[in-house]
Image: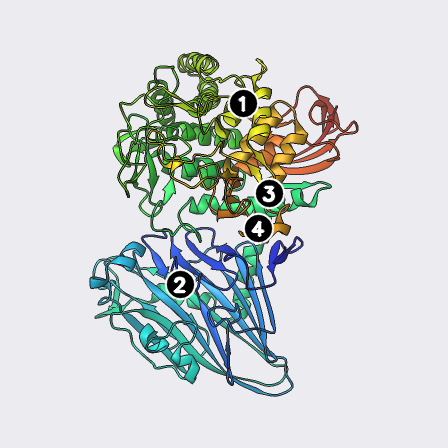
Amino acid sequence: MNFGHFDDVNKEYVITTPDTPLPWINYLGSQDFFSLISNTCGGYSFYKDAKLLRITRYRYNNIPVDSNGKYYYIKDGDSIWNPGAMPTRTSLDAYECRHGLGYSRFHGEKNGLAADLLAFVPVDTPCEINKLTLKNNSDAAKEISLFSYVEFCLWNAVDDMTNYQRNLSTGEVEIIGSTIYHKTEYRERRNHYSFFTVNAPVDGFDTSRDDFLGLGRGNNNPIAVEEGKSRNSVASGWYPIASQQINVTLAPGEEKEFVFLLGYCENPKDDKWEAPNVIKKDPAKKIMEKFAASQQVDAAFAQLNAYWDELLSRYHVESQDPHVNRMANIWNQYQCMVTFNMSRSASYYESGTGRGMGFRDSCQDLLGFVHLIPERARERILDIAATQFEDGSAYHQYQPLTKQGNLDIGSGFNDDPLWLIAAVAAYLKETGDYAILDEMVAFDCHMEKAATLFEHLRRSFEYSRTHLGPHKLPLIGRADWNDCLNLNCFSNEPGESFQTTGPSEGPVAESVFIAGMYVKYGNEFAEICRRVGKEKEAKIAQKAVDEMYQAVLNAGWDGEWFLRAYDAASQKVGSHECEEGQIFIEPQGFCIIAGIGVKEGLAKKALDSVKERLDTKYGIMLHQPAYTKYYLNLGEISSYPPGYKENAGIFCHNNPWISIAETVIGRGNRAFEIYKKTCPSYIENISEIHRTEPYVYSQMIAGRDAARHGEAKNSWLTGTAAWTFVNLSQAILGVQPSYDGLSIDPCIPEGFGDFTLTRHFRGATYYFDVKNPNNVEKGVAYLEVDGKQVEGNVVPVEDGKKEYHVTVHMA
């Protein structure tokens, strides 16, 4: 069942009913100011950090769902409605939401009155613009009242939800004409404020939520709107809001436009005031002047569209499969940008009050983003590395505003150090910018401990090399990629954190998955060493990698698949010897991506076992059989009901690892089959089952043991986005950045046909024309570069050259 459709020409998803199975959201913003917005106008805004600089409130676990937002109430006689349906839920004569790249459009109609709302964050200004157009399509004049509404957060989103003994007394505002300034805590330690304004005279305002809503009412039926009259309230403590009333007269056929702005401003700490207790408004005035007229807003919107057109031009494929084209050219890359910006911090599922930027998460997100804006990827790498500890281990997460590591869920996740090597290797292949390795980078954000980025990589590798267990496999620590496989936790107490309880050092639980990472990214580290002339380090690294390869064959193979781990008692996890959890997806993917077992014939066995034991029509499950009881030695993974999340759910994040592994052994049919099962565009028609947005990936889908098999959760902010783009763009379609240039080695399904691909790389544009006359799954016979046949499958970089025309002949 569909609740909308793709509009590929306009790069939009068109939602045709407000009654989607879950809120279907979009992200506005690309730099520092961000907003989440749902298909019914729910959501919130923040500057840089969703926890520390939250501008507007949103209520998770609320009934009805998806409240609050930026709302526009239209009172037309006795009818009160909103363009996006919420919060009044008035039945509309017409409704449409169009989520685009960095913007959302809403169209509502009721009783001959049409309302069109465009919401976006401009490319270079810290504000959200809402352009509202009202048109009278009836044959009689209309006298209507328009009411805006936003509810301010008192900055720190956690404190805002918990510290009521303080924050119910701190709310402060200023009202100047049509502008409402939110200046809570500005008198003391803050030098920032927000504002909400409209480019028209107002007939009333409210800044007190209680006065606007009325006693015992919700935002679905505010008393001010019902009675058609604002209270002109001035907030003093309690709950500050911003609401303007504009009375509008529309002749038949007439339309009027209004521009509402929600902005964020900062002043120098020593220059905060223009008069006693009157905030300095110069930065706000500049923003308001910049977007005072509809023409200025239209120009900013055109700039936003041009920004995305330019970004997406850097990778573009034209194939016979419209789903591939749609995801590769638009939605997958768009989601990669969002995950790069947000990590796992702020979504409909992530409240923005906890994890911040993940060390592992951000390194992986960069894999799908680095081709878009390499200079931002460079900055992110340096930020991530600066949170690393001197011994090479890392905080598991850090705050985006302060860029300081935090210990909310501890450290000691022993895959973290290797992900830094993965991110830097991807950046070097994309850019050839080896100078980044000489950048001085802090440890634990203390510059007095700074060392070169190369030294950070060396310590990452050394941490892994020196933290091995009895089987010579890497120690798992708190956990590895699967945060819920807690082999050193042993928690029996309700409410204890599985990620911080128990020791991370000392026990000898080992991870075969990290061993696969160690081989793959250890090889990358050795190659980086060679590229910068550090032959001694390269030899040390290569020797350690070769030993790990052998350790996996000796102790990590279970007969038909790779083991998952050894627990703290050196008992096998993910073995046919186990009662439950006999086979896991992660090592089957990553060990083969690393090349382990390929020449020995083990890779095919492992992947066949995955298909036989883990596959479902909705994707590949994390493990089987599901855990039906709590295992003290395994931790959180066995605490979920069977089929959900880490307990045998379908984790979309690592489905691409299996698809990539299939391309390693040349099985394009199977690789593409796996790709299609979790790809949103292919499964749009089961949205009533899948439930999350049909234009972006979700973190997980309920496995076959679950009551709701096929139902997805945790959309948008997931490593699935980056890894699926890597899978499609590099493994299946085959264009891979390398240290020496772009390589091309497609692994496609039979019947996929010829395709063309445009790729921007190191200042040049490459035009690939892939010919597959014999319909093979994998194999490049030869390349022609600008009409000349070349050996191998790498297009070397030539200084100063701006265009390459490459014909790829598969056979």
Q: Is residue 751 left or right of residue 382?
A: right
Residue to which mark 4 is pinned: 689
- Marks 1/3: CA–CA distance: 22 Å
Q: Nearer the viewer, residue 800 or 268?
A: 268
Asked if labels 3 and 2 touch by Cβ distance under 8 angstroms, the answer is no
Q: Residue 541 is drawn in which quadrant?
A: top left
Residue to which mark 2 is pinned: 263
Of circles 1 and 2, the one toward us is 1
Neighbourhood count class around disc 2 (C-alpha, 10 Å): few under 14, some 14–19, many 20 upward: many
Residue to which mark 3 is pinned: 679
Tell me residue 207's x, y (percent): 33, 74
Of circles 4 and 3, the one toward us is 4
- Marks 4/2: CA–CA distance: 39 Å
Residue to which mark 1 is pinned: 592
Against 430, residue 695 (above or below) is below
Q: Residue furthest bottom?
A: 140
Tell me residue 332's x, y (percent): 57, 44
Kind of residue at disc 3: Cys
Against 184, residue 362 (above or below) is above
* Residue displayed at 44% across by 53% down: 348
Kind of residue at disc 2: Gly
User: Considering only order in the chain, which callout, 4 or 1, is on the residue closer to the N terminus?
Assistant: 1
Kind of residue at disc 4: Ile
The quadrant of the image that shows the N terminus is bottom right
Of circles 4 and 2, the one toward us is 4
